[in-house]
Image: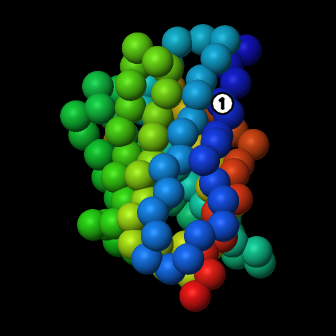
Amino acid sequence: QLQLVESGGGLVQAGDSLRLSCAASGRTFSSYAMGWFRQAPGKEREFVATINWTGRSTYYANSVKGRFTTSRDNAKNTVYLQMNNLKPEDTAVYYCALSYSSGIVTIPGRYNYWGQGTQVTVSS
């Protein structure tokens, strides 16, 4: 059974940076697309970023484009989300997810495994 564990969240000030990590265990993830989603209190889970199995193709939500970068290290079974110039509206629980698809996947329902989430809080 594959498990995804996020880390790297925390409390930061507006303009700061954070790097989230998502480590996969129990199964190799190198053939699959990975995604990042977030959910703020009272809001639906929203797509943030996705990366294909090779790491050569990525896609971002407009709200984070130019500030966030996702990457992966298949040798370490880990995917990353580098978040720069954080804003208070980025405050949410961030989740990583794995899709059996190998390409770009933005729809939550196409993801097969989810992590438990890590809290990111950005103060103004």
Q: Residue 93, how many percent across, how many down?
A: 68, 60
All told, the count of numbered labels is 1
- In the image, residue 102 sits, relative to residue 45, either above or below, namely above
Left or right placement of residue 72 versus residue 110 in this view: left
Q: Residue at 48% of width from left, 50% of height from top?
A: 19
Whether residue 107 is visible to the viewer of this picture, yes or no, is no
Q: Residue 40, how many percent across, how many down?
A: 69, 71
Q: Secondary structure at mark 1?
A: strand
Left or right placement of residue 55 versus residue 116 in this view: left
Q: Residue at 39% of width from left, 64% of height from top?
A: 84
Location of residue 119 by image quarter: bottom right
Q: Residues within 10 Å of mark 1 (few under 14, many from 20)?
A: many
Q: Residue at 58% of width from left, 43% of height from top?
A: 96
Q: Residue furthest bottom?
A: 124
Q: Nearer the viewer, residue 107 or 86?
A: 86
Quarter in which the C terminus is drawn: bottom right
Q: Amino acid at mark 1?
A: Leu
Report the residue marked by disc 1: 4
- In the image, residue 6 sits, relative to residue 19, either above or below, namely above
Q: Residue 12, how many percent across, how many down?
A: 59, 70
Q: Residue at 63% of width from left, 54% of height from top?
A: 9
Whether residue 71 is visible to the viewer of this picture, yes or no, is yes
Q: How is the image coloured?
A: rainbow
Location of residue 91 by image quarter: bottom right
Left or right placement of residue 17 versus residue 46 in this view: left
- In the image, residue 71 sits, relative to residue 90, either above or below, namely above
Q: Residue 112, how many percent across, how many down?
A: 62, 33
Q: Nearer the viewer, residue 90 or 33?
A: 90
